[in-house]
Image (cartoon, rainbow, N blue to C red):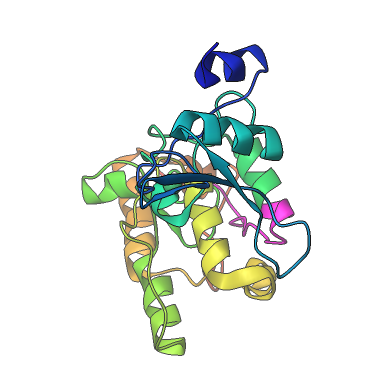
Amino acid sequence: MSATEQAVGEGLELVRCQYNRSGFRCVNASGGLIYAVLQPTRKGHRGRKVPCTTPEEAALVVARDRGTPVGTTCDCGRCMANAAPPPAAAPLTKEEVEKRAADEGLTLALAGTTTSSNGGYKYVVDRTSMRCEGFAIRFVKLEALRAASPNFVPPSPNRFTTAHEAALALARLLGPDGSAEHAVVKEPLTEEAFAECMGKTANGEAFGGMFGGFTCEGLSPPLTPNPGP
Ligand SMILES: [Zn+2]
């Protein structure tokens, strides 16, 4: 029975490595000699070398030593770096984003009010207003972060499928403390947001913005509904 067949029978994977001359992980092939390199038994020591006749046989010795189940891929730095990128991930659900934020100790900053333009989150903007798709972190916030830290690296691209993903990205930029602080600070209303609110009011598209139960955050003094015609 070949080493490959034996591995299958034992439920083990002969882990291939495209950067190892032998073709297998932890199998040394040099000068016509082939060795399986076992795991070190003591910290700081090298693993014992077991001479073998073929790379496959050595790979089986390694697989038994490490107990690599079927499907194991090489975890050497070079193989990991070259591993195919995962398929495009489906957008995270709101619950998934909330769970990740909680796991990372981050606070997602909810906007005081949910408008079509912020998706419910502070400093998040709907890019459809810029004739693009998805959501982005507001430019003013990125500029402020850049001004505060010379090493600041903005997200590239600043483009997210959903508002909550943009909020998570922003929370990650801010870190645990920064995002908690950011969540309680009021987002100033920008001129464009103000203009947007006014525009929507004017064209009747979003009367809710002024008349239907929510107000534009940050207006001072708060706008009161016009009596209307
Ligand atoms: Zn490798």
Residue 155 lies left or right of residue 35; in this view the side is left
Farthest residue, direction left: 131
| Quadrant (top left, top right, bottom left, bottom right) of the C terminus | top left
As drawn, 181 above or below 155: below
| Quadrant (top left, top right, bottom left, bottom right) of the N terminus | top right
Residue 212 lies left or right of residue 154; in this view the side is right
Q: Where is residue 211 drawn, in percent x and y?
A: 52, 45
Q: Where is residue 178 drawn, in percent x and y?
A: 63, 75
As drawn, 127 above or below 13: below
Q: Is residue 112 magenta?
A: yes
What residue is shown at x 65% (from left), y 18% (from top)?
Answer: 11
Stretch of the chain drawn in magenta: 101-115
Q: Where is residue 95 drawn, in percent x and y?
A: 66, 37
Q: Where is residue 202 drawn, in percent x and y?
A: 31, 48
As drawn, 47 above or below 96: below
Residue 141 lies left or right of residue 1; in this view the side is left
Q: Nearer the viewer, residue 69 or 153?
A: 69
Q: Is residue 117 visible?
A: no
Q: Nearer the viewer, residue 158 or 52?
A: 52
Q: How many marks?
A: 0
What residue is shown at x 70% (from left), y 44% (from top)?
Answer: 99
Q: Is residue 90 magenta?
A: no
Q: Nearer the viewer, residue 178 or 111?
A: 178
Q: Quadrant of residue 190?
A: bottom left
Residue 2 lies left or right of residue 87; in this view the side is right
Farthest residue, direction right: 42
